[in-house]
Amino acid sequence: MSYWLFKTEPDTFSIDTLKQQKVSCWEGVRNYQARNMLRDEVKVGDEVLIYHSSCKQVGVAGVATVVRARYPDHTQFEPDSGYFDPKATPETPRWFMVDVEYQRHVPLIKLAEMKQNPALAEMPLVKKGNRLNVMPVTAAQWQAILAMAGE
């Protein structure tokens, strides 16, 4: 099992939305490095920190589990979608997604707090200019973040 952090804008899709839906696809990733992780590394059973970004209170807001491994992101084929990619075809998709299942909310762990935790010093999220929408989390970082949430 691996650990991940998936970023989302809560105005678009939040941990509350995931709780309501129970299971949701993680669509719309349009960065090649993040896409490669979704396509090649994220597996069923992996644990995911749901991170709210581009909002007043950025930080880890909850936990989910991957319940379906990579498959083509349907939005790349939809001309009316903001994620449409005219170069993608069903035969040669360019973008992939996974399905995640809600596990629980955690008390918001703010980015500023994470930056002050020495156990997270090497985490890509806290380093300047390293803000992918999908990023790996080590087991030690996972434990440190859950400890910050009181778990």
Image (cartoon, rainbow, N blue to C red):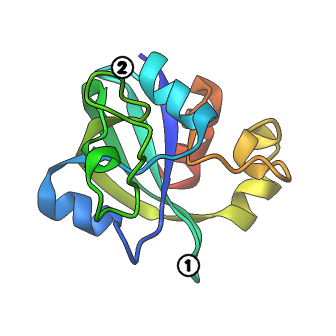
In three-dimensional space, the C-alpha distance between marks 2 and 1, rounded to whole angstroms, equals 29 Å
| Amino acid type indicated by mark 2 | Lys
Front position in the image: 144 or 122: 122
Where residue 138 appears, as percent x and y from the top left, is 62, 26
Where residue 130 appears, as percent x and y from the top left, is 77, 46
Where residue 48 appears, as percent x and y from the top left, is 42, 39
Q: Mark 2 — residue? A: 43
Whether residue 64 is situated above or below residue 71 in the rendered picture: below
Q: Mark 1 — residue? A: 55
Quadrant of the drawing holding the N terminus: top left
Front position in the image: 99 or 139: 99
The circle on residue 83 is none
* Crowd around label 2: few <14 · some 14–19 · many ≥20 (10 Å): many
Which residue is painted at 57% across and 24% down in the image?
Answer: 139
Is residue 89 toward the left or the right of residue 140 in the image? left
Query: Can you tell which quarter of the image residue 56 is in?
Result: bottom right
Q: Earlier in the sequence, mark 2 or mark 1?
A: 2
Whether residue 53 is situated above or below residue 131 in the rendered picture: below
Which residue is painted at 30% across and 22% down in the image?
Answer: 45
Q: Secondary structure at mark 2?
A: loop
Whether residue 76 is situated above or below residue 36 in the rendered picture: below
Seen as rendered, the residue at the extreme front is 86
Is residue 93 toward the left or the right of residue 148 in the image? left
Is residue 116 toward the left or the right of residue 55 in the image? right
Q: Secondary structure at mark 1?
A: loop
Query: Does residue 41 show up?
Result: no
Is residue 67 toward the left or the right of residue 60 in the image? left
Query: Does residue 78 show up?
Result: yes
